[in-house]
Image (cartoon, helix red, strand yellow):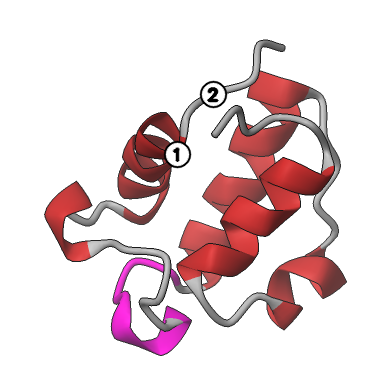
Amino acid sequence: MNPISTAEAMAMLSECFMEPVAKLAPDVLRESVPGWDSMGALMLIAELDERFKIELTADESRTMTRISDVLAFLDRHGMLVD
């Protein structure tokens, strides 16, 4: 459960959403990320639980509209180092 950098978080999101990391940035909208669908959201929930032991509920996940929302969630839980 080691904190990660923003770059590492972006790589994790790239894997969860099956999108090239170059297409992801904090200001990118959820609707602009084809892989951030219901399956991608489940992948993110599972990854956060497995890697950090953080529970992201389905309701919380639905409120996330930008990549920056995921980064802020990680930061609130002390899992983002920069």
Q: Position of residue 53 (x, y in %)?
A: 81, 24
Q: Which residue is mark 1?
A: 6
* Direction top: furthest residue: 2
Give the residue type at disc 1.
Answer: Thr
Helix, strand or loop under label 1: helix
Q: Position of residue 5 (x, y in %)?
A: 47, 29
Front residue of this view, candidates 40 and 65: 65
Instruction: In the rendered structure, find residue 4 and report the number of the disc placed on it.
Output: 2
Instruction: In the rendered structure, find residue 31 and report the number of the disc placed on it.
Output: none
On-image quarter of the N terminus: top right
Q: Quadrant of residue 36?
A: bottom left
Q: Local crowd at mark 2 within 10 Å, few (<14), some, or many (≥20)?
A: some
Give the residue type at disc 2.
Answer: Ile
Which residue is at a point 63% across and 67% down the rendered structure image?
69
Helix, strand or loop under label 2: loop
Q: Position of residue 37 (x, y in %)?
A: 46, 73
Q: Local crowd at mark 1 within 10 Å, few (<14), some, or many (≥20)?
A: some
Q: Which residues are magenta?
A: 30-36
Gap between marks 1 and 2 measured at Cα:
7 Å
